[in-house]
Amino acid sequence: MTDELFVAGLTAIFAIILGWGFRTLPGENWQILAAMPREKHKNGAWRGDNFTYYGVLNANAYLIGVMIFISLLGAVSVPVIGIVTPVLVLLAICVPASKIVARVVEKKKHTFTVGGAAFVGIVIAPWIVRLTDVTIGRGMGFHLPVLTFLAALSIAYAFGEGVGRLACISFGCCYGKPLSQCHPLLQRLFRKYHFVFSGETKKIAYADGLDGEKVVPIQAVTSILYCGSGILGVWLFLKGWYFTAFFETLVITQCWRTISEFFRADFRGDRKISAYQIMGVVAIFYAAAIALIFPGNPSVRHADIVAGLGCLWHPGMILALQALWAAIFIFTGRSSVTASSLSFHVVRDRI
């Protein structure tokens, strides 16, 4: 019963978060969080650096994904050192990869790609886990089951990217095609449920001039599918079906990544079939091969989600999660494609 209550609680929480985001974040006032003065001009105004809600929401997404990941592995009695070590290595590689892959595929220096970073993570994760198992695990007397680890990682990724799409809505990136250019069936499907973005500094405005137009809410569809697959994955994981949890979340997320590209209007490279679509297909077959190389371990204990949640309630873990949030916010939140001009004055009648 505890498992079902936990899954029901997750469902309610994410329904509230996503519902709020879909209604609110396309608005102009949900892009720039703060502007920090950096350089004073001769006219007395300051050039400002903008910090965005994109960074806040991305940091939230990373934090949620990592917390779910730690809770699931803690629930099957994987020690904290066995959880944190491969996660730190993965984050150290995948976070920069979100920029590097975007630069290679899209030829743009000032953008990020979650899909590219996820593909890098899928490729390297099994080997990082295995290396951790035969080094730290063997030295400290614990075993790190690769497939169980990958199941938790795939579930965490589904939640992370599902929530992370709210950041895309806030910044106006990863946007769908205008409804006016879609098939009549899609027009009827999204006649009531669509996005209309406002604000000249949103990417949909400065890249394609589609602000104010009804567009396919592709970010919302992605959020719902990914978080839904994550919720199902959590339930499967807690019931001990690790392979099913791993493959279910990975197939749904990567298949949709491939399909969703056909409904997007933003630039995804020069080819008709984008590099990200190819990555999605390759990831599915690669994951199937990994599942054969590292089969499930029957000795893994039945999951105790209460014990898993207890792993989060430690001063060191809380500080580490706060540091992670701050690092992701700084890395993704400082906008390099928008700027601001600031001026300050004294309110004389309040002196």
Image (cartoon, grey):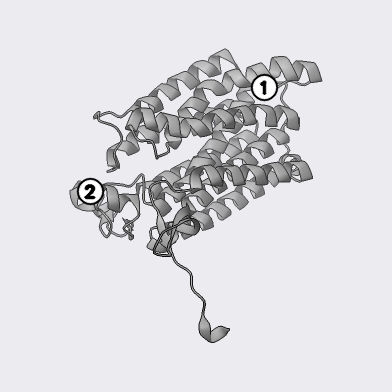
Q: Which residue is drawn at 39% across and 64% down?
A: 43
Q: Which mark is residue 185?
A: 2
N-terminal of the two: label 1 or label 2? 1
Foreground of the two, 137 or 75: 137
Q: Residue at x 66, y 50 (%)?
A: 5
Q: In the figure, 71 relative to 205: above or below?
A: above
Foreground of the two, 146 or 122: 122
Q: In this view, does 322 lie to the left or right of 249?
A: right
Percent position (x, y) of residue 29? 42, 63
Q: In the figure, 328 relative to 272: above or below?
A: below
Q: In this view, does 48 lie to the left or right of 329?
A: left
Q: Classify mark 1: residues with Cα within 10 Å, few (<14), some (14-19) or many (20+).
A: many
The type of residue carrying mark 1 is Pro
Q: Classify mark 2: residues with Cα within 10 Å, few (<14), some (14-19) or many (20+).
A: few
Q: Nearer the viewer, mark 1 or mark 2?
A: 1
Q: Residue at x 57, y 25 (%)?
A: 243
Q: Mark 1 points at which residue?
A: 145
User: What is the secondary structure assignment of the residue under circle 1?
Assistant: loop
State how far apart marks 1 and 2 are (Cα): 46 Å
Quadrant of the image occupied by residue 285: top left
Q: Which mark is residue 350?
A: none
Q: Which quarter shows the C terminus?
A: bottom right
Res 55 visible: yes
Percent position (x, y) of residue 172? 36, 51
Q: Among all residues in the image, which is located at the extreme front?
A: 42
Res 216 visible: no
Q: In this view, does 261 lie to the left or right of 159?
A: left
Percent position (x, y) of residue 3? 67, 43
